[in-house]
Amino acid sequence: MSDNTAHEEPELVQLLTPEGELRTHPDYPFEISGEEARGLYRDMVLVRRFDSEAVALQRQGELGLWASLLGQEAAQIGSGRALRDGDMAFPSYREHGVAWCREVPPRELLGMFRGVTNGGWDPNEHRLHLYTIVIGSQALHATGYAMGVQRDGAVGEDGEAVISYFGDGATSQGDTNEAFNYAAVNNAPVVFFCQNNQWAISEPLERQSRVPIYRRAAGFGFPGIRIDGNDVFASLAVTRAALDGAREGQGPTLIEAFTYRMGAHTTNDDPSRYRASAELEEWKRKDPISRLRAYLEKQGLAGEDFFAGVEAEADALGERVRRECRELPDPAPLEIFDEVYAEPHTGLDRQRAEFADYLASFEGAGAEGGR
Amino acid sequence: MSDNTAHEEPELVQLLTPEGELRTHPDYPFEISGEEARGLYRDMVLVRRFDSEAVALQRQGELGLWASLLGQEAAQIGSGRALRDGDMAFPSYREHGVAWCREVPPRELLGMFRGVTNGGWDPNEHRLHLYTIVIGSQALHATGYAMGVQRDGAVGEDGEAVISYFGDGATSQGDTNEAFNYAAVNNAPVVFFCQNNQWAISEPLERQSRVPIYRRAAGFGFPGIRIDGNDVFASLAVTRAALDGAREGQGPTLIEAFTYRMGAHTTNDDPSRYRASAELEEWKRKDPISRLRAYLEKQGLAGEDFFAGVEAEADALGERVRRECRELPDPAPLEIFDEVYAEPHTGLDRQRAEFADYLASFEGAGAEGGR
Amino acid sequence: MTDLTIGKAINAGLRRAMENDPKVLVMGEDVGRLGGVFRVTDQLHKDFGAERVIDTPLAESGIVGTAIGLALRGYRPVCEIQFDGFFFPAANQTFTQLAKMRRRSAGTLSMPVVLRIPYGGGIGAVEHHSESPEAYFAHTAGLRVVTVANAVDAYWMIQQAITSDDPVVFLEPKRRYYEKAAVDTSASPESAEPMGAARIARPGTDATLIAYGPMVKTALQAAEADEDHSIEVIDLRSISPVDYDTVTASVRRTGRVVITHEAPVGNGVGAEIAARITEDCFYHLEAPVIRVGAFDTPYPQSRLEEHYLPDLDRVLDGVDRAFAY
Amino acid sequence: MTDLTIGKAINAGLRRAMENDPKVLVMGEDVGRLGGVFRVTDQLHKDFGAERVIDTPLAESGIVGTAIGLALRGYRPVCEIQFDGFFFPAANQTFTQLAKMRRRSAGTLSMPVVLRIPYGGGIGAVEHHSESPEAYFAHTAGLRVVTVANAVDAYWMIQQAITSDDPVVFLEPKRRYYEKAAVDTSASPESAEPMGAARIARPGTDATLIAYGPMVKTALQAAEADEDHSIEVIDLRSISPVDYDTVTASVRRTGRVVITHEAPVGNGVGAEIAARITEDCFYHLEAPVIRVGAFDTPYPQSRLEEHYLPDLDRVLDGVDRAFAY
Ligand SMILES: Cc1ncc(C[n+]2csc(CCOP(=O)(O)OP(=O)(O)O)c2C)c(N)n1
Ligand SMILES: Cc1ncc(C[n+]2csc(CCOP(=O)(O)OP(=O)(O)O)c2C)c(N)n1
Ligand SMILES: [Mg+2]
Ligand SMILES: [Mg+2]
């Protein structure tokens, strides 16, 4: 019923080919030191390891759920490293790579997936808002935050910028589109970073959009650009440029990072029900980490020592993640009532007191407690 | 805080100039008989009269509210006359001209504004859905309806098309954008007709959109086009083409009819608080009715007799509107409970019975009723 | 007779409804090839095609809004909202459009739309996947609100919801999806209990314990566990309307009432039922109606949900309180 | 002392809050140059500028969603939802984000956001302009819900709502916007009654009549009109939390209770209050708590609203019913 003519593939910004060759782009002159490139490699390897440990922890019953970033490391690490310290990021629920860049300790990130918290870290300390599960909601939060940046006079040279992450599916949501419009009308300093991993659970991209997603932006009056989402250099360079534009007062940009969800949607999901494995094989050839490794090797920027060192770091991280996850303490029952309100609430205070009495009634009732 | 660069005025399709000259447009070859042109003139004059009577009726306390279409006659009559009998239209709350084309009797249209009903006419009989007040909602209804047309196999030669009306303000609403996307993804046979009258109550267009509204469509992957909304020929020709495209399976189109709200938002509104009267003067020169009259006169298609005849018809219509409005019967109290559910609902049935008893208790309690 | 889980019974009911009426459509996120995240629409896409089993864009307002349009065109859409917590983007279309359309049109327009919503907690999920939003629906005139507690009801009530000309919110107790029962899928629809009727799930004489959806099982366990009293358990089935004939007849016999639901107690459905029972059975009540529900807080992190949700002990505590008067 | 209408008192309160704290913003549709459709933000745009008095795009989810972002940045946004019936597009941002943010963040994040909503009927409006949605808010943990019945409360409570670090739904009884009272705008904030406290609007001994917002005036008239009984009228002011200390003390004295609100009775706020009072004052009640509200139907066309809304006669009928026991 839909015509597919519109789904020809558009140009995308690519600075690093799957073979690890550097390409130039007229709009994004790019230079990178060996150290910086090695840093990006290390980030990607470590966050992938963190991610695979988390998947394993879920299998072992230590986490309730995990949403893997497998395949999206370049999009996240590139954009995450483009952020300045003072910038503010609003993630969805899969941005473990961004969280890594924002120095959220793994244990704080795992808390929500283990079910010991619905949040986990201090968003103001890390300049990373909490994960937001209700699709699209955070795009408006980011836009409002950016309107606050404007009101603080923090736009201009050395200004602050805001970034909002979401997926391809999220672009269908009313909120995301309202955010595009609020940002455009207010010329707010916000970058919309869409990781188009081509799937929203079981639904392929063509159920979400008839045309490439980056084009949505022009309809609202701001620039949209598609990048190779598996190219960490493109992600870094284009996000940096967009953030700089925002901080300097040029308003919003939509970046569509064209990538691929190499794993299941979450540990609850079974992609074999809805997608062909050939697709995955094709995307393995575009893997973000191996292409950066190829680059580092070809350029002679890193040798076996370096790679082995990163591997050892990854092993240590894995061990730490497993340990810290298991050590996460369960909350106490009465915490149910904490921080619902900032100020006393007579109705809730009464319920808390009653429940405390109720809990106390089991004490001394024998080892089994209760009936 | 917003840059205005994007607000240069774009091309719009105009077939009839404010001076009443015909213009040709490469994409919209247009021919019209004298009779058809006179018909459009008559429609516009009559609906304007109907509208001004309604404003007067509101002033006299006969209506609770009225939303005037003054200035938007060409957009509505042109697009309304482009509809085929079997097409389905989803209005907002100001489409009295469209309702006129769909032969909704004035009394049925007035009912909602008088407060004797929240609806008024049979949408299936007139192929015009009820007025929808919650901004943006009907764009999704129209899209869903169009998806039903597809499922009925009614797309193709001599197929059916659907049109959804809304204002410039409505384009900010999440629902409207979701409708754009659902329509695009499903290639649904729906035309989105946006009357950009440049105001959403007190908010000027630049608070709603950074760029001309028709451009929104491209972002979702379907054509958008701006027309001179005060040009009934452009409205007719472009809407007809878009409807034909939809009915033949080419999917949605967004038409932005660039027009002007010459009156207040509604009878409750006082535009002097927020807009300059010079703007109104400028738009008076672009009046949709006078330009068609100029055309008819210049082309020798109508003379004094014709114009006087239409005027007499308008007088008669005015009289009828006044009479029929006053004659609209008040609903009976127990109608509160009618048609809330299709099938019996024990809770509500009980309330109805109790209220009937309560009402009955006043009977015979003396002329004053109650206490 | 076939042994079916609640999830599979709904699936079978959907299938039968689709076979009976070509106007029945299924739509929502991931309802197609995947068969829904709980597999409730499993195989329907394969057997009825993408035109009747529609994978929608990720936009709940769009789901309900286009379902309204499809209903206006004569279809009977069954919308899946993937999880309770994701209903809210559709609140406007549901509350201002779907619920009011018949009344607005003075009966000219019907809205035979079903909103299927897996609801409730207890599955160890992350935020927004464990909510019990029934009070919002029950307070909205124009909607019918039903929920099921066993596979037999699941099979029949989904079909009744679909044939109803009113919009029906069909709440599916997700933590009970795997509960089994024998269902006679060859029986005639007339043999099924009507959707609006409550059911005495366990007769008793000393107190009436009212529950619905996921709490019916807990209520039955509590009634079993209380060796001191004979507890009558009512499975409400329909939340709007409530079958007060059944409820008040029971209360007049027992004189004591406990209501339990997973939703927060404050302004929950239990409040309405308590208020109504008290009005109708004032002189029969030996004790105030006792409500046992979740606390008036957001649904907590899953490691706290066993304390947050009313469980067997909390229900029994409520029964004790009712007998303390 | 200045004579102010409720509308102007809110305006004066907003002004004072904006003067006191540069972080206070006003935002919504038409709140700028127009001053809002009810002129409640009149002149604020002129005096505080477009950066602090923001005419937003026509999108309620956007209003609340960006307000959340502004609050995260340290602002205190006061959002106007133009009419009650247009709240629903913002339901997701309000219920899943605004209400839950503090809890989600374990107290790290505050949401000092006010949602001002003109609500209620009786003004002869077209559909969606006369709704009373308070029950939806009251059932949502994390929100505070207040409403005002006179200009003094209007002036102070809007300021208290703004200084509260919790999200507050501030319901403005639109048909009472023009009711006047003398307000001491120079008094110190400490002198004002706290937002959460109920007020005995009229003392009495025989029955307690509970009302809030637009119904307080009707309740007072009913109490006046009933020459046979001494009726105590409580103006609730806060709907979440409810000040049960004041309420139950009154009920223990009078033994009879009538609750009235404009919202439909079914699953309305009155149900919660009735259920709670019955639990807390069971042995003091001479009669069940009687609820007088609108019927469980969509708000009807305006020519029927006088029958739909509880009026003096219906409230008195409720009082009679309470005394019939
Ligand atoms: C409003 C809402 N509806 C539904 C869901 C359930 N859900 C969780 S993730 C998801 C798919 C998201 O796809 P996309 O935006 O592409 O992000 P991705 O998961 O691919 O990163 C859905 C439907 C949700 N979280 N929120
Ligand atoms: C969801 C919603 N929010 C607010 C309103 C109040 N309102 C009625 S008309 C209007 C402005 C509409 O502007 P536009 O879409 O341009 O249509 P116009 O009135 O100019 O024809 C507003 C804000 C509404 N009806 N619905
Ligand atoms: Mg995706
Ligand atoms: Mg407009």
Image: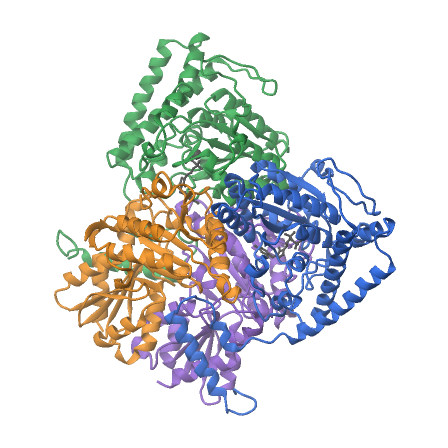
Chain colours: A blue, B green, C purple, D orange
- Relative placement, left or right, of C52 versus C114 is right
In the image shown, does A85 or D44 lie closer to the viewer? A85
Residue at the spot 46% in from the left edge and 34% down from the top edge: B205
* Spot occupied by residue D62 in the image (x, y as percentages of width and height): 49, 47
Where residue A99 sits, quadrant-wise, is: bottom right
Q: Is residue B183 above or below residue B343?
A: above
Where residue A202 sits, quadrant-wise, is: bottom right
Quarter of the rendered image showing ligand 2: top left
- Relative placement, left or right, of A102 versus C325 is right
* Count of all numbered marks drawn on residues in the image: 0
Look at the image and tell me in which quarter the C terminus of chain D lies: bottom left
In the image shown, does A140 or A238 lie closer to the viewer? A238
Residue at the spot 51% in from the left edge and 73% down from the top edge: C215
* Spot occupied by residue C244 in the image (x, y as percentages of width and height): 39, 69
Q: Is residue B219 above or below residue A310?
A: above
* Spot occupied by residue A263 in the image (x, y as percentages of width and height): 74, 58
- Relative placement, left or right, of C250 versus B161 is left
- Relative placement, left or right, of B204 versus B251 is left
In the image shown, does A99 or C62 lie closer to the viewer? A99
Q: Is residue A243 visible?
A: yes
* Spot occupied by residue C118 in the image (x, y as percentages of width and height): 57, 63
Q: Is residue C204 visible?
A: no
